[in-house]
Amino acid sequence: MKVESYTSRSCRFTKLRRNRTKMGEREIPTFSLLRKFMTKQIVFVDMDGVLADFDGAISKAMVDPPEMFVPGFYKNLKVMPGAYRGIAELLSLEHISLYVGSKPTTGNLFSTIEKYEWIAVNFPRLLKRIVLVCDKSLLRGDFLIDDDKDRWAHKFKGEFIHFDRLNSANSWKNIVCKFKGE
Ligand SMILES: [Mg+2]
């Protein structure tokens, strides 16, 4: 790995500053914008049990409840308490880049399009930020906010943030505080 001396970095920075002055004050963001994008952290947020109230739409808690295989199930889920505000707060933070990271139900192929429809209705600002994936270990990011600790905590390469879906409003509040550094 090439080790860069402080002097060479300083020189480059001085050169950038000189160019900036030449171009006028309006060009100042060139360097600072570059730095801002380079330091953004990628945060994935799960859908079922974090954004969408999966548990509220099933009659009995069990693995693979039959309801989830019925067309229309994912489209009609309610929003989890605290999620609207939590997402709005996270989207307002400049140091993070927020994406939805969700696994579609392969036994219900309608889930794929319905997840898109649901985000379009409830969180339209995230519509172009959806990553549907069969295995969340493939997600490349700094954080994953997810309620399924057993399944993904050891697989995700970044920091796993467990979301307590039984205490949704509070979980959202804690997550926002974490990313705001409060
Ligand atoms: Mg989930």
Image: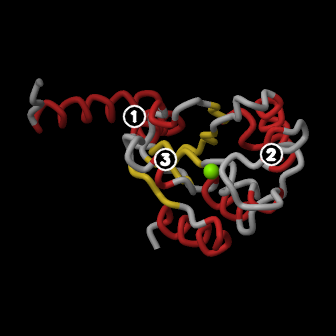
Which residue is pictured at 66% across the width and 69% down the height?
168
Viewer-side label of 3, 1? 3
Callout 3: SS: helix
**First along the sequence among labels 2 and 3:** 2
Which residue is pictured at 70% across the width and 29% down the height?
106
Mark 2–mark 1 contact, CB under 8 Å? no
The image quarter in which residue 72 lies: top right
Tell whether circle 1 marks a residue whose Cβ is less than 8 angstroms from ligand 1: no
- Residue at numbered disc 1: 21
Tell whether circle 3 marks a residue whose Cβ is less than 8 angstroms from ligand 1: no
Callout 2: SS: helix
Q: Is residue 92 visible?
A: yes
Callout 1: SS: helix
**First along the sequence among labels 2 and 1:** 1
Viewer-side label of 2, 3? 2
- Residue at numbered disc 3: 151
Give above or below for 119 relative to 108: below
Left/right placement of residue 11 relative to residue 157 reads left
Label 3, label 1: how far apart the Cα atoms are: 53 Å
Q: Is residue 28 visible?
A: no
The image quarter in which residue 78 lies: bottom right
- Residue at numbered disc 2: 66
Residue 53 coordinates in the image, percent (x, y): 76, 58
Residue type at the position of mark 3? Arg
> Looking at this view, is 3 or 18 the one in front?
3
Residue type at the position of mark 2? Pro
Tell me the crowding category of disc 2: few under 14, some 14 to 19, or many 20 or more residues within 10 angstroms, Cα based: few
Which residue is pictured at 54% across the width and 37% down the height?
26
